[in-house]
Amino acid sequence: MTPHPDPAGGILRSIARALLIISAFVGIAMPTVPAAAGAPVTDDVTTGKIDELLALRATAPGASKGELIERLSSRLLGTPYGADMLIGSADQPEQLVIDLRRVDCFTYLDYVEALSRSIDRDQFVANLIATRYTDSRVEFRQRKHFFSDWSHTARIAATDITGTLSPVAVTVYKHLNAKADGGTYLPGLPVVDRDITYIPSAAVDQGVIGGLRTGDYVGAYADQPGLDVTHVGIFVMTPNGPVFRNASSLAADNQVVDSPFADYVRTTPGIMVLRAQ
């Protein structure tokens, strides 16, 4: 995950206590993955769900990237929310977590993006690693902790199109991971200096929404120092209007839901938009 606190209760992926499943993929060569601490948990639910989603992916060979993201993400609606789903820190070895019984907002996007690129389990695991980790190295320091890492670090998963969507988009030079008090959100990781562009929520009008496509990844801009976003999800245009598809920690949801897009945006300082490649 990233060090971005979820408005409803935190979504730090970095010091996680979550059930992991690796034994579902026994026999798949993953030389960069460190051995799991203790006996891995076999999770038939996740294995079955991955097979189901890969089968769905196979029925749409000519679908666009956005269509694939919409189809795959829709099958995970109702999946329970789980905070801090990843395992690893500066002091704890990173472990490859693959768990579709529960997702946080970032692992939800990890799984959907990896599935959209895959035709079998081997590809899914390789693509998940490449999506979640820079240079496909399963290490805490290589994890893409920030939403903007998806458009800045190898393998590039998406392009930041925020600045193209509105003439009033704002760019802020940020020191990601640096707290205002001089500390860091994620001990053991460096501070990353990066320009972050966002569209203020008041400027997210019909013109901006008209420039969005189903399957775009949307982040809620963080107006505090050291963070790029506080929450992420997927833009989907439905017959009833645009929605923000996300793993919500709100008490009223606590699962993957479709939230009315405009309503959600009004609760944020603004949005960042990444378009999947």
Image (tube, rainbow, N blue to C red):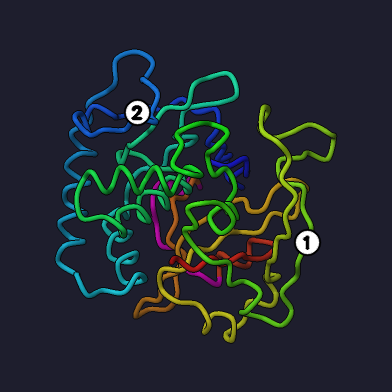
The image shows residue 218 at horizontal and vertical percentages of: 53, 63
Q: Which quadrant would residue 265 be assigned to in this image?
A: bottom right
Residue 56, above or below 107: below
Amino acid type at mark 1: Val
Residue furthest toward the top? 38
The image shows residue 131 at horizontal and vertical percentages of: 43, 49
Report which residue position mark 1 lands on: 172
Please state the extent of the stretch shown in magenta in the rendering: 250-262
Q: Tell me which label, 2 or 1, sits earlier in the chain.
A: 2
Determine the residue positioned at 34% across, 80% down: 239
Q: Residues within 10 Å of mark 1 (few under 14, many from 20)?
A: few
- In this rendered view, identify the residue nearer to me: 119 or 232: 119
Q: Secondary structure at mark 2?
A: loop
Q: Which mark is residue 20?
A: 2
Is 24 placed left or right of 243 in the picture? left
- Distance Cα–Cα, label 2 vs label 1: 37 Å
* Quadrant of the snapshot with the C terminus: bottom left
Q: Secondary structure at mark 1?
A: strand
